[in-house]
Amino acid sequence: MAGSWGHVTNDDGTLRDWAEINESLECQSGDVVECVTELYGMIWWLAQHRARMRFATTDVTREQILDVIASARENYRDGLALGKGHG
């Protein structure tokens, strides 16, 4: 899938080198839009899943999900380390 998760990650799930990412995402073809849209959707889906676990309910609010996203944003460096296999 053009512009997707596969364009920014290697087969083992690690983040590709930025030069390789830049080369594989063509702005004119919509790859960047598709990639960001996919990642945005993945973040929201994962945050909802995490909020349900955190608050022990399937009925979570948008604010609770946003709280999980804010926490992820504050800790993104830890996420980068986990993605590289250092966690």
Image: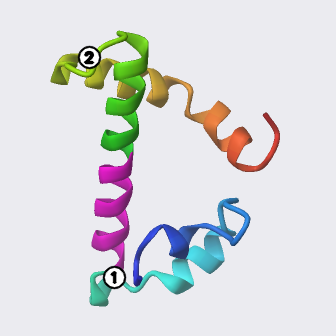
Q: Give, as a three-letter code, the residue at label 1.
A: Cys
Q: Percent x, y for residue 71?
A: 45, 20
Position of the C terminus by quadrant: top right
Percent coordinates x, y for residue 44 in the rendering: 31, 40
Point 42% across, 13% down: residue: 54
Corner quadrant of residue 57: top left
Helix, strand or loop for disc 1: helix
Considering every residue shown, the one lying at the far right of the view is 86
Report the residue at 55% width, 68% height from top. Answer: 8
Q: Which residues are magenta?
A: 31-42
Which secondary structure dominates the residues rendered in magenta?
Answer: helix
Q: Secondary structure at mark 2?
A: helix
Which residue lies at the image location 40% right of the left edge and 77% below the top edge?
Answer: 3
- Residue pointed to by mark 1: 27
- Circle 2 residues within 10 Å: few <14, some 14–19, many ≥20: some
Q: Residue at x 64, y 76 (%)?
A: 19
Quarter of the figure that contains the N terminus? bottom left
Q: Earlier in the sequence, mark 2 or mark 1?
A: 1
Q: Is residue 81 above or below residue 7?
A: above
Disc 2 marks a residue whose amino acid type is: Gln
Alpha carbon separation for disc pair 2 and 1 = 34 Å
Q: Is residue 7 left or right of residue 51?
A: right
Q: Quadrant of residue 80?
A: top right
Question: In the image shown, does 28 or 70 lie closer to the viewer?
Answer: 70
Query: Circle 2 sits on which residue?
Result: 64
Q: Position of residue 25 (x, y in %)?
A: 45, 81
Q: Residues within 10 Å of mark 1 (few under 14, many from 20)?
A: few
